[in-house]
Image (cartoon, rainbow, N blue to C red):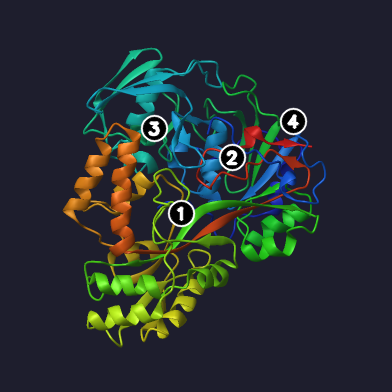
Amino acid sequence: MHGTSAAPSPGSSGAHRFPGLGRRGFLAAGGAAGLGALALAGCAGTSPDAPGKGDGAPRRGGRLRAAFAGGGAGETLDPHLANLFADVARAKALYDKLADYGPDLSARPRLAASWEPDAGLTRWQVTLREAVFHDGRPVTAQDVLHSYRRITDPKKAFRARASLEPLDLRASRALGPRTLEFVLRRPTAEFPNVLAAFGAYIVPEGAADFDRAPVGSGPFRFVSFAPGRSTVLARNDAYWDGAPHLDELEFVVANEESARVGALLGGQVEYAHELNPATARAHEGRGRIVIVRLRNSAMQSFVMKTDRPPFDDPRVRQAFFLIADREELVNGALSGAGEIGNDLFGKGYEYYASGLPQRQQDIGRARALLKEAGAEGLRVTLDTSPVAAGFTEAATVFRDQAAKAGVTVTVRTGSKDSYWKDILDSGTFASYRSGAMPIESHISQRLLTDSTTNATRWRHKDFDALYRQAQSTRDPGERAAVYTRMQRRLHAEGGFLVWGFADWIIGCARNVRGVDAEAPANSLDWARFDRVWLA
């Protein structure tokens, strides 16, 4: 990768105080959405003692410096390679997707002005809005087809490739400059989720030099890039969704959380991404910085492999559901920065089965189920790792809870580098986390017989059939009913013990406004710097 030869612009020197060392931020969705009336709280407006609370008049101008954990000297601005949170934040500043995820993780139009299926849900006509790239060229149907064909190149390992699998791109075609017909391999009611897929950004046909002269259609234009250090962008006055308030946006790499917090407290940055709960508690309401909590951003759970002892017996899985004291896990592992789960992914998201009863700890019933299964005195190994916040703490808390039911849990701490691959391939019981994604995507990627990241080994042909039924059901209400049936089954006997949903925590300077406090990490309005201003 190459840095630019441009001289540092005012304010960019802060990047050199934060060498790119330490823990990386990552998209917990397996390796990371709205139009309409969203609750736009000023970052400072979320604090009771913040100055200018309620001041809703955006002010134009200034540079905002945002500190993220980065990817070191190998960083790139190629949006199809975006994997870390820092990559995605930069990509969404420079580029657009056809759709993105709203706060409930339903797809919202972006470059696509509209989409309409045929009767069989196998052909979708998409109309693009009038938008232009930074070099003045219009965004066309050919640019979209080029971008998707680039992403699905079998010789590449682009993040969105698997998400675009439903598309038959050889048969898909441009019907006009701003109209496309997408042909699908099978009926797909959730086709807009394909358009909103993580990493499915639209680049101009023929684009190549992403690190020296990237050209997108996003709210900011490229100024300079020093991999592992700093990226400087400037306002795109021609942005289709309205020009940003800021003159400039700088992404500063600071891998250690302490460095990000120190830079925020020292006035070297105005926005610090990914703070831990202890930091939030120490600074919340103290008046120096403002803490923003993005609720329901990360599912916290344990996975039980349902294809091998002891978890091939559903009674053992049910017993483990009842062993968990979810409130104790949230308090002990997340320092209270989250809310309890109910053994289902996607709390608060579209199609979530909120009507199912909240599961409570019941040690007596857990013991009875284990006895019935012939599993009294059960011994299991719980794989965990410091790869994600709260993992090792949750393992210890659950170990002590399980002892009350006569279960001996041995905690085995694995390598941060190989943990995710290890727990997919081996073991029986493990710590697990997921970032925000649609419930449909969670099911298709993790719970079908042929899912590539099926950590629980949940393989049931009748469950697969329900998913196909949901995907071929046009009516949203009827489709929701099918998803509820599927979730009822998972709640009763699935392999995900979902004990909580963690807040994603951001710190801001007191003069920052317009940070959305309702958007989970990975959604459109997370890191939405075109809506932010400096008071």
> Dot 1 lies on which element?
loop
Q: CA distance from mark 1 to mark 3?
A: 20 Å
The circle on residue 3 is 2
Give the residue type at disc 4.
Pro
Position of 413 compared to 185: left or right? right
Residue 418 visible at all: no
Which residue, given by chain and number where applicable, does mark 3 sit on? Answer: 195
Give the residue type at disc 3.
Leu
Q: Residues within 10 Å of mark 3 (few under 14, many from 20)?
A: many
Looking at this view, name the residue that lies furthest to the left: 461
Question: In terms of sequence position, does the residue under pointer 2 or pointer 1 come before the other?
Answer: 2
Q: CA distance from mark 2 to mark 1?
A: 28 Å
Q: Residue at x 80, y 48 (%)?
A: 50
> Dot 2 lies on which element?
loop
Percent position (x, y) of residue 196?
Answer: 42, 35
Which residue, given by chain and number where applicable, does mark 4 sit on? Answer: 58
- Camera-near label (2 vs 4) is 4
Give the residue type at disc 1.
Ala
Q: Are marks 1 and 3 in contact (CB under 8 Å)?
A: no
Question: In terms of sequence position, does the residue under pointer 1 or pointer 3 come before the other?
Answer: 1
The circle on residue 453 is none
- Camera-near label (2 vs 1) is 1
Residue 406 visible at all: yes
> Dot 3 lies on which element?
helix
Position of 304 compared to 95: left or right? left
Percent position (x, y) of residue 395?
Answer: 45, 74
Question: In terms of sequence position, does the residue under pointer 4 or pointer 3 come before the other?
Answer: 4
Q: Residues within 10 Å of mark 1 (few under 14, many from 20)?
A: many
Which residue, given by chain and number where applicable, does mark 1 sit on? Answer: 28
> Dot 4 lies on which element?
loop
